[in-house]
Image (cartoon, rainbow, N blue to C red):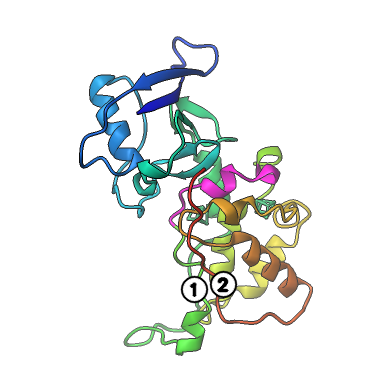
């Protein structure tokens, strides 16, 4: 199997360069991450993040043949060769496939991603009806991998000012939560030329999300709520993630 992987060591390189590799995958190397880890035995200097290996932690997000995805849930047999691997675009590169996600998480924290409820805590949990719970579908599943924001041109140009699709999906998740009491403040905070309205509905975010989520749909609904328009509350669509190119 042929791969071409972006290498960058800030102590030695002035810019990233592609390094070619050829490796025979083992019989159990079904996923791209399996192959990369085998390659790492051959070249221990190759640097990447990974953790759960089953599409839950979001650590091994990278650009695979031009499109963002998670290496651990990308099937080797679906990939065109040579497989070109680059770090997530638009994020500062720390080394090889590892990017600096500081600004991504700063934007995430800027939407106050936690439940605001000022009523005295009940004896047990704060209850929701099945319909109220359904409103969270398509939003709560986000694993904060960064694939969407990294593939969003609006985020590339204004990472300090535009919250980005991942952060906005999380804002939506609390705006539509029946237990949250800060809806007005959340909408007022996002009613800004850059924070929300810099989204140009290019839809890259929904295209690359490895969980099949649609941040663009959430963004559209937040815009409608700010405009005072009625929004259907049945949860967002979740589609099967698109196969890699
Ligand atoms: S919306 Fe999808 S692509 Fe974006 S951070 Fe969440 S899981 Fe990742
Ligand atoms: S729809 Fe909006 S948030 Fe999604 S990629 Fe396009 S500009 Fe970015």
Q: Classify 10 Å Cα crowding around label 2: few (below 14), some (14-19), many (20 and above).
A: some
Residue annotated with mark 2: 236
- The extreme left residue here reads 27
Which of the 4 image quadrants contains residue 193? Answer: bottom right
- Relative horizontal placement of residue 218, taking residue 12 as reference (left or right): right
Q: Secondary structure at mark 2?
A: loop
Identify whether 23 is placed above or below 13. below
Q: Give the x, y percent position of residue 162.
A: 68, 49
Which of the 4 image quadrants contains residue 169? Answer: bottom right
Instruction: Evaluate whether residue 18 shows in this view.
Output: yes
Q: Who's the residue at 47% across and 33% down the image?
A: 99
- Relative horizontal placement of residue 214, taking residue 220 as reference (left or right): left
Question: Which numbered tag is attached to residue 174?
Answer: none
The reply to whether the magenta stretch includes residue 144 is yes
Identify whether 96 is placed above or below 138. above
Mark 2 residue's CB less than 8 Å from ligand 1 = no
Q: Who's the residue at 44% across and 64% down the image?
A: 141
The one of 63 and 133 positioned closer to us in this rendering? 63
Q: Are circles 1 and 2 on residues that touch, CB within 8 Å?
A: yes
Which segment did they paint magenta? Answer: 143-155
- Alpha carbons under labels 1 and 2: distance apart: 6 Å
């Amino acid at each position: 199997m042929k791969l071409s992987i972006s290498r960058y060591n800030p102590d030695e390189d002035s810019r990233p360069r592609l390094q070619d590799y050829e490796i025979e995958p083992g019989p159990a190397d079904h996923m791209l991450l399996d192959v990369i880890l085998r390659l790492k035995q051959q070249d221990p200097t190759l640097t990447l993040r990974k953790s759960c290996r089953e599409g839950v932690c979001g650590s091994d997000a990278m650009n695979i043949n031009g499109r963002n995805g998670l290496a651990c849930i990308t099937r080797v047999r679906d990939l065109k060769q040579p497989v070109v691997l680059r770090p997530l675009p638009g994020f500062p590169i720390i080394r090889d496939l590892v990017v600096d996600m500081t600004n991504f998480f700063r934007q995430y924290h800027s939407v106050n991603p936690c439940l605001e409820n000022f009523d005295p805590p009940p004896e047990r949990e704060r209850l929701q009806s099945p319909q109220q719970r359904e409103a969270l579908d398509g939003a709560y599943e986000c694993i904060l991998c960064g694939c969407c924001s990294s593939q969003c041109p609006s985020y590339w140009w204004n990472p300090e000012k535009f919250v980005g699709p991942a952060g906005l999906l999380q804002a939506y998740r609390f705006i539509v939560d029946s237990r949250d009491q800060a809806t007005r403040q959340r909408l007022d905070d996002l009613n800004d030329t850059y924070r929300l309205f810099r989204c140009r509905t290019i839809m890259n975010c929904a295209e690359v999300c490895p969980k099949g989520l649609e941040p663009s749909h959430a963004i559209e609904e937040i815009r409608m709520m700010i405009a005072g328009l009625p929004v259907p509350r049945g949860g967002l669509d979740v589609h099967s993630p698109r196969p890699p190119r």
